[in-house]
C-alpha cells in the first residue's frame, strides 16, 4: 500500500556528514519510527498470530526504498555546492538508463493502452517527479539532511489522502494513529527549527529551550 512510504531516512546525517545531532533530534527520530511501527501493524498490536504477508512485503520494500533515498539525501547534502540543475540531470540520466534496462528486461517497454487516463498519467507523473526532485535538492542546499528527511515523512499523510481520493481506500485505525505520531514528530521538528532562529533573549525561546537540547 502507498502508506508504507518514507519514514526511515532520518538517523544517518550525523554519522555520514558530521551534522549536529542533539538529544531531542534523536528522540524525535525514535518517536517518528514508533509511528512507522504502528502503521506496519505488527502482531503484538493487532493480536494476530503473524504478520499479514502483503503488509510485511510492502513494509520491507518501503524500508529498502528509504535506505536508498536516505543515501541520496546524504549525498546531495555532501555535494550541495553543485548546481541543482546538474544534480537533476545526473539523477535523471541514471534513472532513465536504469528504467530502460528494467523495462526491456521484463518486456514491458510500450505505450499505455486504453483510455486517456493512462496517457495523462504518463505526462503528469514525470512532471510531478521533476518538481519533487527539484524541491528536495534545493531543500538540502539550505537545511541539514536530518530535518529535511524527517519533514519528508509527511508524504505518508498525503499517501492516505491520495489513496482515499483516487483508490477509495480508507486507512484503518492503526494507520491513522501511526500517521498522527509521524505528523507530531514533523511539527515538533519544524517548531524546534523556528525556535533556533529566535534571539537568545526571546521569551518563547526561553519557554521551550528544552527542545533545543
Image (cartoon, rainbow, N blue to C red):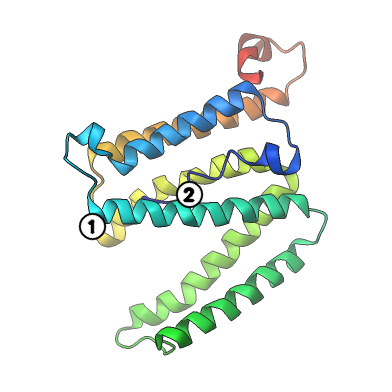
Image quarter (top left, top right, bottom left or bottom right) of the N terminus? bottom left
Q: Is residue 90 above or below residue 56?
A: below
Q: In the drawing, does residue 108 fall left or right of residue 143?
A: left
Residue occupying image coordinates x 37% and y 86%? 112
Q: In the drawing, does residue 91 fall left or right of residue 55?
A: right
Q: Does residue 144 show up?
A: no
The spot of residue 173 in percent (x, y) is: 24, 37
Q: Secondary structure at mark 2?
A: loop
| Quadrant assignment, res 35 | top left
Q: Is residue 26 above or below residue 206?
A: below
Which residue occupies the extreme right position in the image? 81
The spot of residue 158 in percent (x, y) is: 41, 50
Residue occupying image coordinates x 67% and y 15%? 205
Q: Does residue 45 show up?
A: yes
The spot of residue 91 in percent (x, y) is: 65, 68
Q: Secondary structure at mark 1?
A: loop
Q: CA distance from mark 2 to mark 1?
A: 22 Å
Image quarter (top left, top right, bottom left or bottom right) of the C terminus? top right
Q: Is residue 195 above or below residue 156?
A: above
Labels 2 and 1: the sequence-earlier one:
2
Q: In the drawing, does residue 46 fall left or right of residue 137?
A: left
Q: Where is mark 1, residue-wise?
A: 168
Residue occupying image coordinates x 73% and y 26%? 197
How many residues crowd mark 2 within 10 Å: few (<14), some (14–19), many (20+)?
Answer: many
Residue occupying image coordinates x 63% and y 41%? 12
Of labels 2 and 1, the one closer to you: 2
Residue 6 numbered tag: 2
Which residue occupies the extreme front position in the image? 49
The spot of residue 149 in percent (x, y) is: 58, 44
Amino acid at each position: 500500500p502507498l502508506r508504507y512510504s518514507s519514514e526511515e531516512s532520518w538517523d544517518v546525517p550525523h554519522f555520514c556528514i558530521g551534522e549536529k545531532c542533539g538529544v531531542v533530534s534523536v528522540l524525535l527520530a525514535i518517536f517518528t519510527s514508533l509511528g512507522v511501527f504502528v502503521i506496519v501493524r505488527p502482531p503484538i498490536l493487532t493480536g494476530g498470530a503473524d504478520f499479514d504477508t502483503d503488509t510485511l512485503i510492502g513494509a520491507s520494500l518501503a524500508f529498502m526504498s528509504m535506505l536508498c533515498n536516505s543515501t541520496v539525501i546524504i549525498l546531495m547534502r555532501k555535494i550541495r555546492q553543485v548546481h541543482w540543475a546538474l544534480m537533476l540531470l545526473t539523477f535523471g540520466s541514471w534513472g532513465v538508463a536504469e528504467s530502460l534496462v528494467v523495462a526491456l528486461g521484463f518486456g514491458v517497454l510500450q505505450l499505455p493502452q486504453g483510455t486517456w487516463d493512462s496517457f495523462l498519467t504518463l505526462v503528469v507523473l514525470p512532471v510531478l517527479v521533476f518538481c519533487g526532485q527539484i524541491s528536495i535538492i534545493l531543500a538540502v542546499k539550505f537545511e541539514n539532511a536530518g530535518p529535511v528527511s524527517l519533514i519528508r515523512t509527511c508524504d505518508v499523510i498525503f499517501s492516505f489522502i491520495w489513496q482515499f481520493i483516487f483508490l477509495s481506500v480508507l486507512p484503518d485505525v492503526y494507520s491513522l494513529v501511526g500517521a498522527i505520531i509521524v505528523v507530531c514528530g514533523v511539527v515538533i521538528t519544524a517548531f524546534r527549527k523556528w525556535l533556533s532562529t529566535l534571539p537568545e533573549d526571546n521569551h518563547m525561546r526561553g519557554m521551550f529551550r528544552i527542545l533545543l537540547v
